[in-house]
């Protein structure tokens, strides 16, 4: 039975040797030599140090293309023209599914044709040498961003290749991403990733780990997202990770988003061990975007204003071409500059908004309910508590494709556009909190002259892409 226990050194080595045998580039990983390479990197490329010492929100886009030279060119452009503080390497879908042979075929075709035949950078296929060429070429810290349920080989190669930050986790890269992998399986796989990061950390190379905060990216109630961030943070800390960036995805109501980011930082420092440095990352809107760039820039600007008020340590930006799919490098840089402009104009202003403290208190109460039920389900063990809580529905994520979550919880916006819970199912929550949600949704229903129903949920999912925050009925109800 899997538990929240540190992987012993001999077991770490055994798993490491086994997973590196799954693809030829795994043979090039040498832990001791990798430590020497990391030690040779200048301070301004050390991800955790740069992030933790920042005095204002740092900006980071998403970006990944298959060929090494193109990836270098793309990141250099985003660093120079987009003024990105931190840079990503987004991994391709075949690698995320551990289909390295298909990734290799796509990479070879990209080299032959010059086309982007993969939707990201196949780091496993480029191997340690290719990763280091990328790290050496770019004058800023770079993070691996992916979406991989089993990221063990990817972690082994990219850590050895010089990357010092790695996104994802066993819940946040399972529940929103896959039906094929059970939660117990992904927790066990990610214990290796975190233990490997911990092994580097123990040698003085602090690998930053970043659980994926937006989850399904669709009206996720803040307390659910924060509870899962705390669980993944605790699991990583057990394995020796000491730099953790807890994530949160914008829901669009400024009061609720600022309150949630405040609660995330406070609860992260409360629930995680003292030796862990906790930072936060704010993801700009992850749902549907308006189809034209002018209105999309409005959505991005709202994210920038929210970040200026809440001041998370990092912001993951979006581009005005989100509606079209993968943005051009120019559009990606434009989203960075838009966000930076708004933050730089607003961050020195004293902006007081009524209701933040009250909303933060509610989010914290909700999150504690969920954490308490996890501890109760597992008799104090976070792994077992998480598995049993998801199995019973006491912990749940809305709109989840994974069979590991019931996906029975349904959110809807209240009359101010804050995300509330319309259908609780078996989610563990105090009755007085449920009454608050019910009353605020009832107020919206009265305003709109309709009953509370699933129609509200569906309307809210599409609202921002339609140019609104709340999915109000149009015309006759």
Image (cartoon, rainbow, N blue to C red):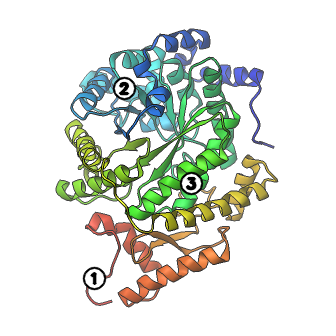
Residue 461 in sight in this render? yes
Residue carrying label 1: 474
- Quadrant of the image for the C terminus? bottom left
Going 30% across and 28% down the picture, which residue do you hit?
A: 75
Report whether 133 appears left or right of 238. left
- Counting labels gives 3
Q: Position of residue 159 (x, y in %)?
A: 53, 22
- Residue 57: percent from left, percent from top: 38, 41
Question: Is 282 on the left or on the right of 267, as rendered?
Answer: left
Q: Viewer-proximal residue, 59 or 37?
A: 59
What x and y, as percent, mark residue 175? 56, 52
Q: Is residue 285 above or below residue 314?
A: below
- At x 70%, y 53%, the residue is 386
- Rounded to the nearest angstrom, the CA distance separating label 3 from label 1 is 34 Å
Closer to the chain start, of discs 3 and 1, is: 3
Residue 354, compared with residue 438, is above or below; it is above
**How many C-alpha atoms fall within 10 Å of the one at disc 3: few (<14), some, or many (≥20)?**
many
Looking at the rendering, which quadrant does residue 82 occupy?
A: top left
Q: Which mark is residue 199?
A: none
Q: CA distance from mark 3 to mark 2?
A: 37 Å
Residues at marks 1 and 2, CA–CA distance in whole angstroms: 48 Å
Q: Whole-percent x and y of residue 125? A: 45, 22
Residue topped by disc 2: 107
- Give the quadrant of residue 29: top right
Residue that numbered label 3 is attached to: 226
Q: Secondary structure at mark 1?
A: loop
The one nearer the camera, 100 or 354, is 354
Nearer to us: label 3 or label 2: 3
How would you rate the neighbour count of disc 2 (Cα within 10 Å): few for under 14, some for 14-19, many for 20 or more? many
Q: Residue at x 59, y 18 (%)?
A: 204
């Amino acid at each position: 039975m899997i538990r929240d226990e540190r992987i012993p050194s001999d077991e770490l080595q055994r798993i490491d040797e086994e997973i590196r045998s799954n693809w030829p580039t795994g043979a090039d990983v040498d832990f001791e030599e990798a430590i020497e390479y990391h030690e040779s990197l200048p301070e301004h490329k050390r991800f955790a140090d740069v992030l933790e010492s920042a005095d204002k929100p740092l900006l980071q886009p998403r970006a990944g293309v298959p060929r090494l030279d193109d990836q270098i060119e793309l990141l250099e452009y985003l660093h120079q023209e987009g003024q990105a503080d931190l840079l990503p390497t987004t991994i391709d879908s075949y690698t995320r599914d551990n289909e390295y042979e298909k990734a290799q075929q796509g990479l070879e075709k990209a080299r032959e044709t010059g086309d982007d035949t993969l939707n990201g950078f196949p780091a496993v296929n480029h191997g340690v040498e290719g990763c280091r060429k990328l790290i050496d070429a770019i004058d800023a810290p770079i993070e691996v961003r992916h979406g991989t349920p089993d990221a063990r080989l990817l972690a082994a190669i990219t850590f050895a290749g010089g990357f010092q930050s790695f996104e994802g986790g066993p819940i946040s890269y399972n529940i929103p991403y896959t039906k094929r992998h059970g939660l117990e399986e992904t927790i066990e796989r990610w214990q290796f990733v975190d233990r490997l990061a911990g092994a580097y950390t123990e040698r003085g190379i602090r690998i930053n780990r970043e659980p994926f905060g937006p989850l399904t990216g669709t009206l996720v109630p803040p307390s659910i997202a924060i509870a899962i961030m705390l669980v993944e943070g605790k699991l990583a800390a057990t394995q020796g990770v000491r730099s953790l960036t807890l994530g949160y995805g914008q829901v669009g109501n400024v009061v609720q988003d600022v309150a949630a980011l405040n609660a995330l930082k406070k609860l992260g420092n409360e629930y995680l061990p003292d030796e862990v440095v906790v930072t936060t990352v704010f993801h700009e809107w992850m749902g549907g975007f308006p189809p034209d760039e002018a209105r999309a820039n409005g959505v991005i600007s709202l994210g920038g204003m929210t970040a200026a008020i809440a001041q998370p340590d990092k912001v993951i930006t979006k581009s005005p071409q989100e509606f079209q799919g993968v943005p051009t490098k120019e559009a990606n840089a434009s989203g960075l500059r838009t966000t930076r402009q708004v933050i730089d104009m607003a961050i020195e202003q004293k902006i007081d908004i009524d209701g933040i403290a009250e909303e933060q208190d509610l989010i914290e109460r909700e999150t504690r309910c969920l954490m308490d039920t996890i501890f109760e389900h597992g008799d104090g063990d976070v792994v077992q508590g998480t598995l049993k809580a998801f199995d019973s529905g006491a912990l749940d994520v809305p709109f989840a494709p994974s069979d590991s979550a019931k996906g029975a919880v349904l959110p809807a916006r209240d009359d101010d556009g804050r995300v509330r819970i319309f259908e609780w199912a078996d989610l563990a929550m105090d009755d007085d909190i449920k009454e608050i949600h019910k009353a605020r949704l009832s107020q919206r229903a009265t305003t709109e002259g309709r009953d509370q129903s699933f129609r509200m949920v569906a309307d809210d999912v599409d609202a921002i892409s339609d140019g609104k925050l709340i999915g109000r009925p149009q015309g006759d109800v």
